[in-house]
Amino acid sequence: MTALVPADVVSRLKSVLGPEGWSTDPDRLAPKLVEWRDRWSGHTPLLVLPKSADEVSAIVGICFEAGVAITPQGGNTGLVGGQIPMGEILLSTERMRAVRLTDTFDDVLVAEAGVTLAAVHEAAAAVGRRFPLGLASEGSATVGGFVSTNAGGTQVLRYGSTRNLVLGLEAVLPNGEIWNGLKRLRKDNTGYDLKQLLIGGEGTLGVVTAAALKLHPVYASRGVAICAVATPQAAVELLNLAKDKAGGAIEAFELMNREVLELAIRHIPGVRDPLAAASPWYVLAEFSAAEPGSAEAAMERCLAEGLERALISDAVIAQTESQAAAFWRIRESLSAAQKPEGAGWKHDVAVPVSRVAEMIEAGSRAVLALAPQARVAAFGHVGDGNIHFNIVRPAGGDEAAFDALRDAGAHAVHDVVMALDGSISAEHGLGSMKTEEARRYKSPVEVAAMAAIRLALDPKRIMNPRVLF
């Protein structure tokens, strides 16, 4: 792999793509070279904009032959820097926006890599189905991006992460060959599952060009509520109660602390305090079911018993769809609400659900020992053990001094997480932010096995070379 992209390679890429298929315009490139949180900014000699799998194949084939590196990019919503090029060819899938198929017998939707998650939701709704992946960035996150990062979101508790929602893939492998694995099968026991290597592979084993996505029924009954809880442990116990009372009807179970809620109230227009009195912690719960009224009834039974057991001190149930949307707007605003406070220490971690409270308590002690006046802004998917454990600099504090402690803070939090049998990346991936950090915790056996898979498929290491092992 060469350090610089030879001029003849650039010329060949331009030739196969035509005038609409590439750009070097600084204004065109600018938004693709900066990560959403402004932590990473990059550069590229050429933005390539294929409109088909065949054009992706041509691009990758030329780069493979020349040993030129490629950084694939979807909607640029990643939070660990893996989509930002540092001199590589930048391959954007933004022109690949066709929904090729919706089928209610097989309950499948086939969409190209540049289709946004919002467009997937709309296409599924148009045929009376739903695709149950919920991300705050649905308007910009794309199929190729959420598949390549194995996105999680708010409904993992019930449906699993992206890898549970994909039936098949079409992808261009690192040598430029197209693999057509767009099967609609629920069962295919014929050896290694190549699609599962590509899902979560962060573009290192190929470029996803289309995906066959599982569709689910639209439920007739829905209940949404926000509850006040005193501690994360009370939230975990409330979740167990909800499982006992409602079984599979629990759609989402989200936790947020007062600190991060106050940031949303301060910085996000239209966000208001959901309850009359402030609480240290809040749970946003959603129940859904096939029979009209049954989800609401199950939720009310759960909340009533939660009050009786003193697991919750107050709750408000959404009475309309607009009120339910307002509740969800609070939760979906939490990441954006931290941005005006300056760069923070971001930790996307997972532990067993039973150890969420322990992780938050021990993690808080660890970071406050480093930065005593820092603010812990914790929120996330308590239903699957994934907490976004973010540390905001002290109000009025020195930003440079706070930033200088970021790596030490990450090590402290990750040490706590790994001691609890957790993961340092629950749903954002490793990217360029966490790849080296992951080496501190993964066994040599695991790193060697992952590196061997990559070497077999990408011997020249041209695909997203700075990411993973």
Image (tube, rainbow, N blue to C red):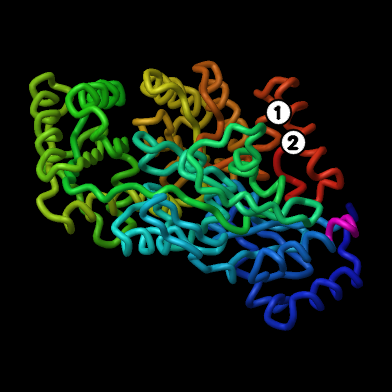
Q: Secondary structure at mark 2?
A: loop
Disc 1 crowd, CA 10 A, few/some/many (<14, 14-19, 20+): some
Q: Position of residue 43 (x, y in %)?
A: 73, 63
- Residue 354 located left or right of residue 321: right
Mark 1 vs 2, N-terminal side: 1
Q: Give 244 or 351, whichever is nearer the viewer.
A: 244
Measuring 37% from the left and 47% from the top, which residue is drawn there? 132
Separation of disc 1 and disc 2 at Cα? 9 Å
Query: Are dots 1 and 2 in contact, CB under 8 Å?
Result: yes
**Residue 65 among those drawn in magenta:** yes
Residue 391, numbered circle:
none
Q: Which residue is mark 2?
A: 469
Q: Which residue is mark 1?
A: 439
For residue 165, say whether it is visible: yes
- Residue 223 located left or right of residue 168: left
Residue that protrudes farthest toward the bottom in the picture: 19
Q: Give 343 or 61, whichever is nearer the viewer.
A: 61
- Residue 18 located left or right of residue 183: right
Give the magenta range.
63-67
Splitting the image into 4 quarters, where does residue 305 fall?
A: top left
